[in-house]
Image (spheres, coloured by chain):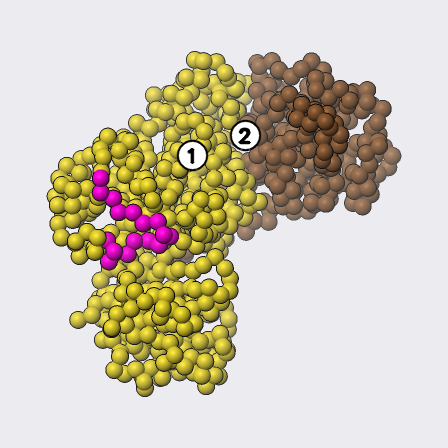
Chain colours: A brown, B yellow
Amino acid sequence: MKRATTIKPTWCPGCGNFAILGAINQALDKLKLEPHQVTFVYDVGCSSNMADFAYAYGFHGLHGRALPAAAGIKLANFKLPVVAIIGDGGCYGEGLNHFVTLARGNHDILVISHNNYLYSLTTGQMSPTTKKGHQTPSTPEGSIEEPFNPLANAIINHATFVARGFAGNIPHLTNLLNQALNHKGFALLDVLQPCVTYNKDLTYDWYRKNIYDINKQGHDPKDKKKALELAYQTDKLPIGVFFQEQKPAYHEQVSNFSDTPLAQQDISNIDISSLL
Amino acid sequence: MNTSFNWKIAGAAGEGIKKAGLIFAKTCFKHGLSVHGYTEYPSLIRGGHNTFQIHASSADVVAPGFQLDVLVDIHGQAKDIHKAEITQQTVILADNLPLSDLVKQAGGSAKMKNMAALGASCFLLGLSLDKLNQTLAEVFAKKGDEIIQANHKVTQAGYNFAQKNFKNQAKPPIKANGENKDKVFLTGNQALSYGAIAGGMKLYAAYPMTPATSILHTLAAKAKSANITVRHAEDEIGTANMAIGAGFAGVRSMVATSGGGFSLMTEALGLAGITETPLVIVNVMRPGPASGMPTWSSQGDLLYVIHASQDEFPRIVLTPGDPQECFQLSKLAQNLAEKYQLPVIILTDKYLGESYFTINKPASKHQNQRYGLADTKTLKNDNPFPRYQDTDTGISPRSLPGQLGGVHLCNSYEHNQLGYATEDSAERIQQVNKRAKKIPQILKDPDFIKPILYGPKTASQTLISWGSNKSVVLQALKSLKSTNFIHFPLVWPFPAQAFQTLIKGSQKLITLECNSTAQLNQLITQQTGLQIKDKLLKYDGRPFFPEEIVSKLS
């Protein structure tokens, strides 16, 4: 299946984004989704430059605003799988209100957060997930804020699928993507993504030494309390499906929900007599 | 013979002023009168000073009247606050009407004081108590029979008291010309909401902001029967981006707010511009900047919405003058946004949005055409669809997500004809020019809304205005000699040619608007070179009253 445009990716050699895109393509192949059958919504950042490289329907929006656009597409046409490609800056910084609210509403979108713990497209300033004390061009004396916890926030804000993957383990990531794409409701897949250019601390090797697969260890994703406990762990980083539950999606709960998506409804003749 | 009356009820927030006013206005409407309702209230839930005033007439009435026939003063402060509106003929219902005693004697609760006042008002204005009670039963239908009966006893008590004590002050009743069968009584915000539905809007997203909130309330209440999706979203940034997402996926969408929310939507306005996605944004203006005066009226955002967002892209700005135009232009906005693939802004204000008007009932059945949707049946799924193909009109065919053969990228970055990001000089110039080509197309469109001349073709003075001043000026025109009026229901792209044709027969031009820097006046100069010295400006949060205009111009 054609998955790539003729434009050569502009990511740095060794960037985690290559692996994430590879895993996404494998997952789409596995689900036999053709390029016109999936819609990507891109934020603004290194990860979202994928817009030019991926061959599928795409909406390259504003920084921090990929999620509301994705939710709008889903409300317009719930038959489309909608995948938001976003970074830690856009998702947990500028767009945090959208992240929290759309999770609470269980909007049926898959959010793939490319978490490299920095703003890399703007040359490496601290991001919401940057560890306290980290020196960056915007925090030369070390960052003052405590880092944002994406998984814990997703869990307490009622996201119905919460997982973490690692860009250095493509088979595992592909498997998570498959599960996330099959999930109905708000899915967060936070991906640990090494930034080889600006983040010299969080390298592939560092991650390999410090991550472990919770599902292999028998974690039950139905166990919300345990999931939250795992999300709080920072000495070692758990990967896998933390939490999953089945609940009606937002679009199924709106008052005019029907089998025909809004985008396919006929507007050629509208009778407003009942309104007046 | 009297052909109209002005009635006003005033009291604190929480005393049921708006509810009583609305019930009385609907009662007048039931009599077959043409009715206008105007409300003033502070931004709080209890206390302060609230008013609802009614101008009712056997002839068409489209604006509030200044001098009152009846003032109902519930909290005892209205006599002083509204001194200027009181004449020797004004009947004031205050201490002379023992509301608390009447309610008590009728077995009602303290909340029903306003209803006793309505009973007394019915007698004073020669209106039918039965019709008041019918209206009351309709408005309180959900509250149940017991409460309705209790209220009926109170209205009766008020009526009886007035009959006994105010016989000499009663006004001669006004005879209506018809039964209002083909009319409706609604606000500009309601008309705009129904117009959007008629225009095929399927998704409405909003964050509450006065004075646009009643659009959200209206549409949310009608979501099921009108088969639309309404979402109260996290903030105005979310609403606008969500609506653009839905627009990209092929759904006609709308968002509404006031100036503050519009400011938050400004980046998304540019997003709709560069991605060429249909979007309708409503700005119901209030005085600002920042939090300003939330519950009052203003026309201070004209130049702002024409220029909002960085850089240049085409947009359309509609400025309806009354609920009829709110309906018509809201429907048109949905069609224009899709036809030209751009943002359409509808600019109204608190006065138009929240005042009640008697208008002809809009048609029941509405036809909509779909515009610009690409047929990709013959295309294969292996090449990007040229979403931003350069065309003679600047409008490129659009495929929708899910459509085979139409795969493309809709891009907020400057892009080439395929939608992919570009920084190439020639491609940048091509796309800027492509988007700009839409402007001359819009100006040539048979649906393009031109300025309208009211009154004689030639006159010694010509008033020029836009938006909600229309109805007020039309009311004033009846009392002005040799005066005509040009109304702009659309200000952008500026209809320079049509305007210049209209003023050929004019001697003295005067612009009138509710802002302090004469923004339409500036725009006319910018777009035509014409300088207009005379201007009438008001920016205290109140609309112009017809009497004010008459006294300044005669």
Instruction: Decide which of A40, B554 is in the foreground and name it.
Output: B554
Q: CA distance from mark 1 to mark 2?
A: 18 Å
Instruction: Decide which of B427, A256 is in the foreground and name it.
Output: B427
Q: Which residue is mark 2?
A: A61
What residue do we see at 41% from left, 49% from top?
Answer: B286
Other residues around mark 2 within 10 Å, as few (<14) / some (14–19) / many (≥20): many
Instruction: Decide which of B160, B97 is in the foreground and name it.
Output: B97
Q: Amino acid at mark 1?
A: Ala
Q: Residue A164, position in %: x, y?
A: 75, 32
Q: Amino acid at mark 2?
A: Gly
Q: Tell me, yes or no, whether the highlighted magenta stretch contains residue B543.
A: yes
What residue do we see at 12% from left, 45% from top?
Answer: B460
Report whether residue B31 is seen: no
Q: Residue A200, position in %: x, y?
A: 75, 19
Q: Which residue is mark 1?
A: B308
Q: Chain of mark 1?
A: B
Left of B425 or right of it: where is A14? right
Q: Residue B452, position in %: x, y?
A: 23, 43
Please report the bounds of the magenta region as a residue range: B533-549
Residue B521, picture quadrant:
top left
Q: Check the image and name the residue furthest to the right.
A: A217
Q: Quadrant of the N terminus of chain B?
A: bottom left
Left of B542 or right of it: where is A27? right
Helix, strand or loop for disc 1: loop
The nearer-to-camera label among 1 and 2 is 1
